[in-house]
Image: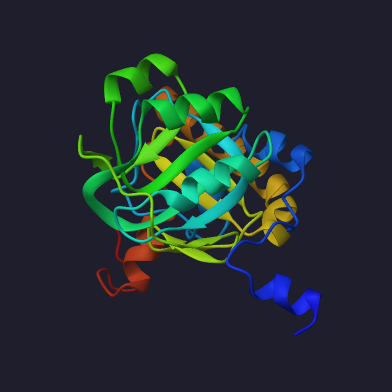
């Protein structure tokens, strides 16, 4: 087996293309809901993965980690490899029998300049994490600690919160949760997201002024669904 093939099959992949910092900066201005809408109403992690506090926001390229339930060995390895701004995205198999990360690891992530952590698993040391102010999304908390002995994989495609995620994909999170956009698609959605924001501002202004409270599309949608007959209105 040549060196190139061996590297591609290794459990740890060191090199991958990240979504660019410029795209991350622009995309992070938008709500996760806006990006999800213009991405075709897809890419959002299951709602069980939520921020520790509603004030949490994050944006950056995915640094993907797959672990066996209850073991965080590969998260430690990933922290030694990740670059500033990277978002650690952990496929923890939704296990909440013990925490995968706590105050010590999250403090190290902050010191390393990482952009945040998304766990399809549990955290611990909630009060300390809230004081740190570092972006953390997880399934919940459990005071029990993990083992550190079972191999996993780094920077392979993973499933986190029911969504397929590749290393380098765009990750954006806010109070609603986390959305993932494929690296190759991210730039193409920025103009659509900006237009969506303008459309929603106009709609909200109409509602506040009382000029157009009922959606203009409602009757047509009800007819298309067979709820109203042709020519019938509410």
Query: In this rendering, does residue 216 appear at all?
Result: no
Q: Locate residue 9, reporting x and y percent.
A: 65, 75
Which corner quadrant of the image does residue 202 belong to? top right
Question: Outermost residue toward the bottom?
Answer: 1
Lateral position of residue 21 relative to residue 165, left or right? right
Please say which color scheme the image uses: rainbow
Q: How many labels were placed on the picture? A: 0
Lateral position of residue 184 relative to residue 210, left or right? right
Please report the residue visible at 43 percent of the width from the left and 36 percent of the height from the top: 212
Please report the residue visible at 34 percent of the width from the left and 54 percent of the height from the top: 46
Question: Outermost residue toward the top?
Answer: 131
Q: Locate residue 66, reporting x and y percent.
A: 46, 60
- In this rendering, is residue 55 above or below 28? above
Lateral position of residue 13 relative to residue 103, left or right? right
Please report the residue visible at 34 percent of the width from the left and 70 percent of the height from the top: 223
Q: Locate residue 45, reporting x and y percent.
A: 41, 53
**Most foreground residue, 107 or 150:** 150
Q: Locate residue 227, reporting x and y percent.
A: 24, 70
**Most foreground residue, 28 or 222:** 28
- Quadrant of the frame with the C terminus: bottom left
Please report the residue visible at 29 percent of the width from the left and 46 percent of the height from the top: 146
Query: In this rendering, does residue 79 appear at all?
Result: yes
- Quadrant of the frame with the N terminus: bottom right
**Most foreground residue, 200 or 162:** 162
Which corner quadrant of the image does residue 217 belong to? bottom left
């Amino acid at each position: 087996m040549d060196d190139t093939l061996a590297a591609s099959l290794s459990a740890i992949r060191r090199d991958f293309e990240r979504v660019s910092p410029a795209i991350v900066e622009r995309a992070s201005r938008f709500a996760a809901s806006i990006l999800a809408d213009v991405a075709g109403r897809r890419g959002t992690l299951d709602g069980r993965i939520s921020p520790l506090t509603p004030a949490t926001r994050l944006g950056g390229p995915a640094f993907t980690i797959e672990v066996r339930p209850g073991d965080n060995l590969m998260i430690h390895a990933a922290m030694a490899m990740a670059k500033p701004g990277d978002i650690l995205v952990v496929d923890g198999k939704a296990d909440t029998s013990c925490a995968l990360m706590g105050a010590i690891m999250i403090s190290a992530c902050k010191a390393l300049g990482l952009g945040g952590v998304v766990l399809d698993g549990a955290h611990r040391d909630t009060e300390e994490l809230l004081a740190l102010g570092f972006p953390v999304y997880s399934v919940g908390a459990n005071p029990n600690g993990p083992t550190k002995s079972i191999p996993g994989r780094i920077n392979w495609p993973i499933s986190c919160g029911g969504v397929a995620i590749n290393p380098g994909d765009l990750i954006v999170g806010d109070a609603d949760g986390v959305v993932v956009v494929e690296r190759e698609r991210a730039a193409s959605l920025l103009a659509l997201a900006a237009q969506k924001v303008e459309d929603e501002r106009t709609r909200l202004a109409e509602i506040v002024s009382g000029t157009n409270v009922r959606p203009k599309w409602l009757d047509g949608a009800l007819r298309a669904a067979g709820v109203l007959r042709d020519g019938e209105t509410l």
